Every structure is written in structure tokens, then in C-alpha cells.
Amino acid sequence: MNSVALLIGGNQGHREQLIEQATELIRQRIGSVVALSGVYETDPWGEFDTPQQNFLNRALLVQTALGAHEVLHEALAIEASLGRVRPAQPDHKYHSRPMDIDLIFFNDEIIDTPDLTIPHPRMHLRRFVLEPLAEIMPDYRHPVMHKTVKELLYEI
């Protein structure tokens, strides 16, 4: 079995309902949710094209028989099923979305392929990732930075 840390969140539609739906779809399509953070409301992060509603985010630790790329495939399918539409041409701006599912960690692996980078390359810069992660896995050690999630949170 593999352990995958996911961060889910969105800022469109019925945000609370979408968080619960995404959590259930992850259980059905990816694996057993063994730890679940509370839901955090956060300001939008990054450069957006228009003013944004706040995001709701939750971290999950999931045990899965799937490989990392299979988890990514399922996560993208779940996002789409909940109304996520990705821009045809990436413009390096952030956009409102009903659901976003990020793979943060996969076991202790370091993966760097054109479609997947694990650990998530910007997670250590984002309080909205670190706070819910610290709730469910504070002592997990980042395989590249060699610091715990809790230590990374304190550094922000």
C-alpha cells in the first residue's frame, strides 16, 4: 500500500458541499482516508485574473493501491466531475475553481516528471497547505528539505 497526502480545496459554488463530495469521491476512487484535517478558510494565494472568494481547504492522508500517476489521473477525473475546467492554454495565473486536488507527498518518494512533481514544489511556501497538513501529519519529514511539516509551517 502507498500513502498519499492530498490537499483539496476550491472557491466556487457550494464550497462546503464540494469539499465533502471530493472527500467521498477520493474514498471511492483512490483509497482509504486514514486522516482528515478540519476545513480551513483562506485568502486566495497567487496572481488571479479577477477578485476572488476565499478558498476552503482540507488535507487528507490516503492509503492506496494506486501508483502516483494513477492517483493523479483519478484526482483530475474527480476535479472534472465536480465542475473544474482547466484553461486550454496555461497562462500562469490562478483561476477560480470549484475543486482542486493537489498531490503533496507520495510515500517518501521524489518524483519529477513533466506531469507530476512530488513533493509538491510550492507546498512549503503556502500556509493554506501547511496548516491542514500539520494537523494530520506534523512530524512527517519532507524528503527533499528534510524538515517536518510542523517546522516548515513555523518558518512561514
Image (cartoon, rainbow, N blue to C red):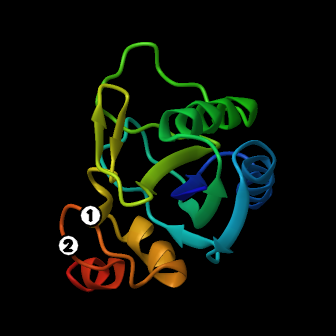
Choose top left, top right, bottom left or bottom right for residue 100: top right
The CA span between labels 2 and 1 is 6 Å
Q: Is residue 142 above or below residue 91?
A: below
Q: Which mark is residue 125?
A: none
Q: Residue at x 75, y 31 (%)?
A: 81
Along the horizontal axis of the image, is 15 left or right of 131?
right
Total numbered labels placed on residues in the image: 2
- Rendered position, 107 above or below 74: below
Specify the amino acid type for callout 2.
Answer: His
Name the foreground residue: 70 vs 38: 70
- Residue under numbered circle 2: 146
Q: Position of residue 139 (x, y in %)?
A: 39, 84
Quadrant location, the C terminus:
bottom left
Residue 2 is drawn in which quadrant? Answer: bottom right
Few, some or many residues within 10 Å of mark 2 (<14, 14–19, 20+): few
Q: Are marks 2 and 1 in contact (CB under 8 Å)?
A: yes
> What x and y, as percent, mark residue 33?
71, 64
Q: Residues within 10 Å of mark 1 (few under 14, many from 20)?
A: some
Horizontal and vertical percent position of residue 133: 47, 73
Residue 103 image point, x, y percent: 47, 49
**Residue at disc 2, secondary structure:** loop
Q: Which residue is mark 1?
A: 143
Compared to 29, does 15 lie above or below? below
Query: Residue at position x 69%, y 46% from top?
Result: 30
Quarter of the image for the N terminus: give it: bottom right
Circle 1: residue type: Pro
Relative horizontal placement of residue 49, taking residue 75 as reference (left or right):
left
Which one is in front, 39 or 24?
Answer: 24
Secondary structure under tag 1 reads loop
Residue positioned most to the top:
88
The residue under the point 74% across, 60% down is: 32
